[in-house]
Amino acid sequence: MQVVKLRKVGNSTTVTLPASVVDALHLQENDEIAIEVSGDRIVLTRATTDFQDAWAAYQQVEPRYRNANRKLAE
């Protein structure tokens, strides 16, 4: 695990991804990532069209399985 600091930039707070993470995920400048809050975790995922379609489908069924998903995440 790598620890990074949050920094204030204008009205936003930013985090810089270490080069090792960017390299491991083959990310490039201007790539999009999806951000999800899961309990006390922040999950970053490469945002591809397939991912966005799958995420939209998940969002539709997630309320039905919210409690089961929380138990699985423990």
Image: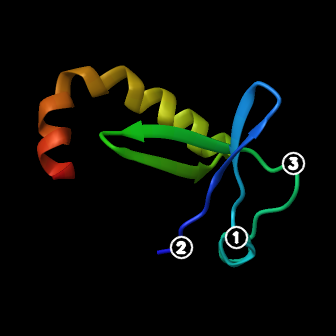
Judged by depth in the image, the label closer to the viewer, 2 or 3, is 2
Dot 1 amino acid type: Pro
Element at label 3: loop
Identity of the residue drawn at 25% across and 21% down:
63
Q: Badge 1 is on which residue?
A: 18
Q: Position of residue 71 (x, y in %)?
A: 11, 44
Q: Badge 3 is on which residue?
A: 30
Identity of the residue drawn at 62% across and 57% down:
5
Q: Earlier in the sequence, mark 2 or mark 3?
A: 2
Identity of the residue drawn at 66% across and 77% down:
24
Dot 2 amino acid type: Gln
Categorize mark 2 by other alpha carbons within 10 Å: few (<14), some (14-19), many (20+): few
Identity of the residue drawn at 47% across and 49% down:
43
Judged by depth in the image, the label closer to the viewer, 3 or 1, is 1
Q: Earlier in the sequence, mark 1 or mark 2?
A: 2
Q: CA distance from mark 3 to mark 1?
A: 16 Å
Q: Seen in the image, is 58 located left or right of residue 6?
A: left
Dot 3 amino acid type: Asn
Q: CA distance from mark 1 to mark 2?
A: 8 Å
Q: Badge 2 is on which residue?
A: 2
Categorize mark 3 by other alpha carbons within 10 Å: few (<14), some (14-19), many (20+): few
